[in-house]
Image (tube, coloured by chain):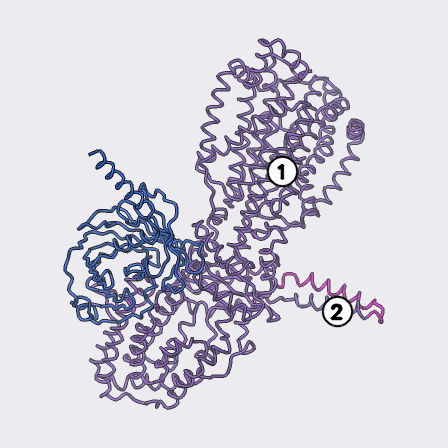
Chain colours: A blue, B purple
Amino acid sequence: MKDYFSFFAALLCLCRFSLANESGEQIIQQVNDNLNVENSHSISQMTIITTSGNTRTFVFESWSKDNGEKTLICYREPTRVKGQATLMLNNADDIWMYFPRTQRVRKLATHAKKQKMEGSDFSYEDMGGGDAFINDFVAKRLDDEEMQGCDCYKLELTRKPDGDVSYSRLVMWVIKENYYPIVIDYYDEDDRQRLHKRLTQSEIKVIDGIPTAHKAVMHDKNDNTQTQIEMLQVRYLVDVPDDMFTERSLKK
Amino acid sequence: MREKILRRLADLHAQHPWRMLIFVSLLTILFMIFAGQLTTTMRVSDLMPEKHPRVVAFNKVIDEFAAATNLTVVVQGDEHRIKAFADALAPRILSLVDSSQNEKWRQEIAALDKKLARLDAHDTEKQADIVQEIRQKQRRLDFKLFQRVDYKTDTEFFKDHMLMLIKAGDLNNTKELFMDPNLVGLIRNLNNSMEKEYVGQQQSISTREKEDGAVAFIGGIENLIETLQLSMDDHVTPNAAQKAADKLLFGEPYMLSYDRSALVMIGIPHFTIMDRDLLLIAAVQVQELVDDMLQEFPDVSAGLTGSIAREHDEQVYAEQSFSYSTIIAFVFILFILVFSFRMWVAPLFAMATLFIGVIWAMGAAWLAVQQLNMMTAMMAVILLGLGIDFAIHFVASFTERRAAGDTIDASLEHTFLKSVKGIITGALTTACAFLTLMISETRGMRELGIVIGVGLLAILLATVLVLPIMLVLRERRIDKKIALCKKTRKKRDISFRFLGRLAEHFSGSYAFTLGFALVITAILIWSALQIKYDHNMMNIEPKGLQSIALQDTVLEKFDLSLESSLILANSVQESRELAEKSKDKSSVALVSDISAYLPTPREQAERAPHIMEIKTAMHRATVRQDIAPTRLPLLIDELDRLETNIIEMQDMAFLGGQDKVDNACKTIVGDPENPDAVSRVQQLIAEIENASNAAPLLSQFQRFFAPYFKNTVLRMSTTDPITLSDLPVSVLDQYSNKTREKFLVTVYPAGPLWEDKEFLERFNADLDRVSQRATGSAPLFTALISIFARDGRNAVLLTVMLVFALLWIDFRKPQYALLAMIPLAAGIFWMVGLMNLVGMQFNFVNLIGLPLIIGIGIDDGVHLMHRWKIEGHGHMRTVFAGTGKAILLTSLTTMFAFGSLIFSAFRGWASFGAALTIGVGACFLTSIIFLPGVMGFLERKVVHQPEKVREVEEIEA
């Protein structure tokens, strides 16, 4: 019996040891898995700063499918944008927009994904999901740190030579408990030392078994502006039909 | 030696006061002439080290680029009225001349002519020099002040080369726009182009430059619709139709704000900002012109800003503030002196001496630095506060001896030998503290040290040369009166006995006193550590200055800061590269440089085929004289489509937070949030549908519009390469120097520079990445702050060391030097702590107060220590009643002098005055609280520790 317990204790220690020694690649894979959920449906509220310095708040409903490869965003508030919709396919490589006032659908060019989305500090690339953390960056684990009161892994993601992203590197603090990135620092495309943006996520709750931040603030250090997105409602175990992600469905 | 000189001086005054009076009068006249030459400058660059690369670059820009000096008129009101106002004002500005100095120039020319006539005929070199000089002076006769007024675009150049200035990609997307001059075809092409843009250029309205482009484009469409509506009312003229074509092709020619309620006119002078006289004359003359014009345009408002107006306003305000503060300080000091000495004459003599001393100091300042800057301009007030102390001590000593019954000669000799020695030591200590600033790298601080240090010495000289004369002459008169009336002199005790009683109490309960003082000090140290630094340079500027307020108007209406930065390029190519690098930076809103007018040969080659395509299409296009009624439904469809495109653009802009584009679209399609808003496109459609004669009315428009549009596009379609020599003078003057060898890149920040420290740092960091040669207010100010901080730290350290060394020499024991410095050390913390408590922040002007307070605040402790040593144990009451009164008086006069600056319109000076008023007050308080406590403690120690008696007695001896 004593030996039995010793064996279990040893196994437990081994498990802990292997977790503690996870490589950057392993951690980022877990993060990627966490973020890329098969399907999702959410209602969010986004606040932006306009070019005149005023704040403007939008409420939008979004559906995502195939680990974020397809995304549809429908604006609900304010009344002026109600029904306006954006469809992003191929991880935001192709973007369409629907205008209810004119009832027309327009296509935006592919390289818009690096541009700011709807006046926010998020780019389409930031919103599009996909496997960018795995495909476009090389992850390196740095010394663990506490961030916002959470015990975190600290990772440095350096852009691969062929990486199609607008940041030279990212520094990410990942909560050890659930592999959720609580803070991500985005560094300038041309200057590795220059912090461009910082994403801070909070109010993390487990929804349908998946940790989810209900509040995300993107602070653009260059423009000194920030955009806040609050998740009002989110579900992952939802059936999202394929035909939602078509030009025709945008009008519905 | 020193005694011999002082005795001789006393003798001279006592025996020959009239001779001395003549001597000092001559000296005063001489220094008054010197002082009259002093000028002031309020430029930040004049505070920087002269050889700093950013200052060198800035001065080079000022010297070589006419456009670097400007006078901007901001006109506000209804769009049509402000345009009319500008059209009327521009030629009047151009006709302004300065004839005020014609007489002077004529005299100088006549003198040179005479000199030329006297010259040896073979001395050709000298002759040529004089002829050259005569020509220069002749140019100053009826000097034309302005060379150009920029307020609308020079469209002639664009009419020849516009298409060559459009990027190949944009030409490809928009070329349809230029292929059909007829109304229906044109609107169809507009629609095609707008729809194409969404596909090909996703970034169409995502950056400031693109946003501006979109606003200009929508402005052109709005004007077209407005002109079509005019046509439907049968009011169209050829001029209106041609303007509509021009606006569609080239955008708004006037420099209008986004909401079209403001217009700027930029006057480029024939002089630079360094020509102080012309600058002031030009600002006054333009202001008079504007005021006259406003009588004709009562519904319009207009004011001046730009470098000339700002420099003018700052100089005028500086001089006014300087005068007000000096008068206020004079009155307050006189009042204190009269109150404390309880007589009128001696204080008036002291003030007269001070007045003469300040004249000498200003004369000396001209000899030393020629020009006062933002920091040294307040020299008179500082000198009043510090210099009066010398006279106070002199008068006190002399009147004391006279009251004691000494003769005039004996009193004067006693004063020279006993008081003047102390005055000289005190003056030298304070002057040395200021002169340590000479080690500063910044010109502002270095000159402040020189001007005040030398100024104090000048006042010291005035005190020992002028004051005795007045006192001797007055005392002789009184003696004569007394002899005639056989009266005796009244004796008065004018010491402050309450201070003595207070100090005795503090000294008696030294433990409580020191404990209490330490608790207060700890609280104020905590408060001092909370104080913030105000980076907003605008907060040191005068409040309510029109030129400053209008800068905010320009920022608000044009979304553009006038605080641009400048980079000097050595070629067009370098200018292009610098501009491209700058545009990439997120902290940059706009970049303006010559390369926008001079595409590279490769770019021109890329654009040429598109231009040829446009040219060919336009050649082939037939100008239709009429619009057939059968084509009206087609026109209406295209107008509907145009409205749809603008609505989509508006919705995209709203979602993207692009307010300017959204607002521009509202003027055409209405505000979707306002149910009463109307779409001008729909209005036009309704007018066309409802009018039975729509076709002929629109045909008339087409007859005016189409041929002009076609010809203009054909003229624009030239593929001849653009070279530097093709550019209009207005463009060349704006971007290149007189020899066309250097080029200026102007970089406008994307945010408020002064209100957001982080943004300022980012903007400067971005500029540094673009070029280390970047200059202008942001880089200059940031460099100034960092050099100031270094200078300030060095000055503080050196002053502390110097003061400690002087005190050590004076007291002969380092521990006594340290003791005298206790009130100063605590006083500095009290000063900063109190500043924080009253809501003040440090800025780069009041920060200079810190090294200065060391030199000023040390005096109280030194005087009290000296007196304590002289009086010996148990005479705390005498020490503080006598010397306490003196330091209270000198502190009050200094506080009132600095305090008078609080009334200054320059908020930087006001905060400097407030900081030093608090500082001097704090040092006085710490001196009368800490020192009695420490002295009481030392005296008790002597009683309880007999072994130390000898040491203390020795020191006291």
Q: Quadrant of residue A193?
A: bottom left
> Neighbour class for label 1 at 10 Å: few (<14), some, many (≥20)?
many
Element type where label 1 sits in the image? helix
Residue placed under numbered mark 1 in the picture: B383
**Which residue is at the front of the view, A11 or B138?**
A11
**Which residue is at the front of the view, B626 or B50?**
B50
Q: Quadrant of residue B344?
A: top right
State left or right for residue B827 relative to residue A211.
Answer: right
Element type where label 2 sits in the image? helix
> Neighbour class for label 2 at 10 Å: few (<14), some, many (≥20)?
some
Q: CA distance from mark 1 to mark 2?
A: 46 Å
State left or right for residue B567 relative to residue A247.
Answer: right
- CB-based contact (under 8 Å), mark 1 and mark 2: no
Magenta span: chief secondary structure: helix
Residue placed under numbered mark 2 in the picture: B131
Q: Position of residue B577 (x, y in %)?
A: 51, 67
Q: Position of residue A228 (x, y in %)?
A: 29, 52
Which region shows up in magenta? B97-123
Asked if residue B94 shows in the view, the reply is no
State left or right for residue B798 relative to residue B744.
Answer: right
**Which residue is at the front of the view, B7 or B584?**
B584
Q: Position of residue B65 (x, y in %)?
A: 58, 65
**Which residue is at the front of the view, B188 or B8?**
B188
The residue that appears at 69% across and 29% down in the rendered structure is: B425
Against B707, residue B440 (above or below) is above
Asked if residue A207 shows in the view, the reply is yes
